[in-house]
Amino acid sequence: MKNRFMTYLTQALLIGGLSLGVAACSENDAEEAGEEIDQMVDDAGDAIDDAADDAGNAIEDACENVKEGVDAEDTDC
């Protein structure tokens, strides 16, 4: 899970850096550059949320597997 999070974060930062580079080299105005940065931040936040959800689901699945393995009455975690 940690690797997936780092991959998403790296991708988001790379996209953001490239967006800033393109914005600086072209004739885009400051508003368009700001919108690109806002989108990059939103995408990075979504990637982090997805990674956290995946990690939480994996932990819950592992807990349920352990409870099933010991024949617990309640297998929900």
Image (cartoon, helix red, strand yellow):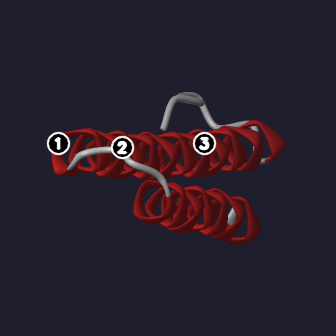
The residue singled out by tag 1 in the image is: 31
The residue singled out by tag 2 in the image is: 36
The dot on residue 54 is: 3
Look at the numbered discs 3 and 1 and tell me whether their residues touch, using CB distance below 8 Å.
Answer: no
Look at the numbered discs 2 and 3 and tell me whether their residues touch, using CB distance below 8 Å.
Answer: no
> Mark 1 or mark 2, which is nearer the start of the sequence?
1
Q: Assign the N terminus to one quadrant of the image.
A: bottom right
Q: Nearer the viewer, mark 3 or mark 1?
A: 1
The kind of residue tagged 1 is Glu
Q: Nearer the viewer, mark 2 or mark 1?
A: 1
The kind of residue tagged 3 is Asp
The CA distance from mark 2 to mark 1 is 9 Å
Q: Position of residue 50 (x, y in %)?
A: 52, 40
The CA distance from mark 2 to mark 3 is 27 Å
| Point 48% across, 38% down: residue | 77
| Point 76% across, 41% down: residue | 65
The CA distance from mark 3 to mark 1 is 35 Å
> At numbered mark 2, what does the secondary structure look like: helix, strand or loop?
helix
Please tell me how many numbered marks the rendered image carries.
3
Local crowd size for mark 2, using a 10 Å CA cut-off: few (<14), some (14–19), many (≥20): some
Q: Above or below — where is 15 with respect to 29?
A: below
